Image (cartoon, rainbow, N blue to C red):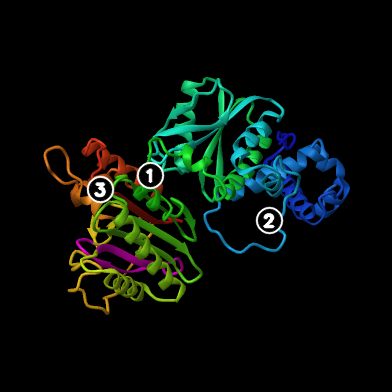
Amino acid sequence: MPDPGPTSSSGARRSDAVANVARILDAAEELLRRRPHVSIGEIAQFAGVGRSTLYRHFETREALVEAVRRRARDHAEHDHAPSLRPAGELANVAVTPLSVPDVLNKVAPFQLSEQIVAEAQRLDGIESAALYVADLAGVVLRKLAGAPAFPDELRIHGTIGTEIPREAYGPIRAAVTARLPGAVVTPLMLRGRAIGMLVVVGEENDSLRDLAQEAAVALALADGYTDTLQTARRARPTSPAAEIQQNLLPARIHRLRGATLAGNVLPGYDVGGDWFDVADNADAVWLGVADVEGSGVHAAGLAAVLLGAFRSARHQGEDPAGAAALMHEVLLATGPDITATTTIGCWNATTSVFRWVSTGSHGPLLAHADGRVEELDPGVGPCLGSPELDPPFRLQQRRLDPGQRLVLLSDGGLESQDASGVPFGRDGVAAALRATRGATAAATVHAIEHAICVRIDEHLEDDVTTVVLAPHTH
């Protein structure tokens, strides 16, 4: 944006200039939603300023439109309180570089990545481009499409499985530019996290950022029509059990009302009995973590059955105790000696109260702002599906304060052993949590996973599932 004008006379003049810019942007945003071709004169009149004042801040209509779009996008990227918007607020104020409906209707899903790269390369100032996605282990960016000069893989750090949290953008940019000096890295953002990265040789500009935003939506929708994206995310062949498991999982990073949530399953590949699930409903945010005993396709199939029971209970309006009871009933009906450790809960954004039921060897952990780690349910009993477990289940609750982090773990994380046979345990988790005081949900998940992998030399004998809910501090 051009400088608001001379500022030598007084602070009042500077304040007037800032106020004028704000009024112009507000007026332009509102009118452009109603009529995309509204004139500069109409915008000035609606803002209560003269045309000369408007042109003093924005030399052309295009400059004003770009400023409106930039402000709207920046607000969206940093908005941590999703809510119903006034009608018309979400309308575009100018043509975007890529139309999601058009590209999905006109381009074969398996060719979408090549189309996105082609669209990037036609932008002013862009010489060449490549599109990357993170692999399941979260250790490399793998090229989906792009010029041969771009490497097939780029080593990274800080992702949550295939999704990239905001705090990882900077380190990833640094890692990429160390390998490709002068490259520009633009995240494909979707609801507070990136599902891929555009890497280009050229100049970063708003058109490139707009393209990346539209490309994220298009890729997410196209993923249901082709295996291209999922194949690129697999650094090594997966077993049928691991494929079943991956298709059970929701998004890894969630922007919620009043909180952020991150979850991931580090797969044992031949195990497949873990899952986590999240649903942001009108009444509460539902969370579930389960670890079905056994391994292979049998365990993965039983995990899918158990997840179906969990979702069915949610759809029927059950509370966590009712959901756990239905899941227990389904396991008993499936066959003998089928058990699972679980934590099923709901978090209410208005009251910040978490209500839950845990079965098996451990319950949730609560990381306090001062570094203390509290075990919320140390007295859990038989596993879900055990004949000794007798509903109705005891529903517990705890209010979560800003700065605290709720942590749900599967057995694999706590019981993973190092070379000498010592389990990671609650002490290992507590150490990782203390080392990440004040960290985001995604950074906390990454820290716990990293600590486990370092301790056991990255050889997982069981799936490791971690879910962290972090209420906002403001």
Is residue 214 shown to the viewer in this render?
yes
- The numbered mark, 1 or 2, whose residue comes first in the sequence reads 2
Tell whether label 2 touches label 3 (CB within 8 Å): no
* Residue 344 among magenta residues: yes
Instruction: State how far apart marks 3 and 2 are (Cα).
Output: 44 Å
**In this image, 180 relative to 375: left or right?**
right
Which residue is disc 1 drawn over?
A: 443
Q: Residue furthest left?
A: 420
Tell which tag, 3 or 1, sits nearer the viewer.
3
Q: Mark 3 is on which residue type?
A: Asp
Q: Main secondary structure of the magenta part?
A: strand
Tell me the quadrant of the picture where the N terminus can be found: top right
**Mark with earlier residue (3, 2):** 2
Instruction: Report x, y in % for residue 367.
Output: 29, 54
Q: Which residue is mark 2?
A: 90
The image quadrant of residue 55 is: top right
* Magenta extent: 340-362
Could you tell whether 376 is left or right of 109 in the image? left
Magenta segment: does it hold 459? no
Quick one: 111 or 173, which is closer to the camera?
Answer: 111
Amino acid carrying label 1: it is Ala
Q: CA distance from mark 1 to mark 2?
A: 30 Å
Q: Which quarter of the figure has residue 167?
A: top left
Q: Upstream in the sequence, badge 3 or badge 1? A: 1
Q: Name the secondary structure under disc 2.
A: loop
Is mark 1 in CB contact (under 8 Å) with mark 2?
no
Residue that numbered label 3 is attached to: 462
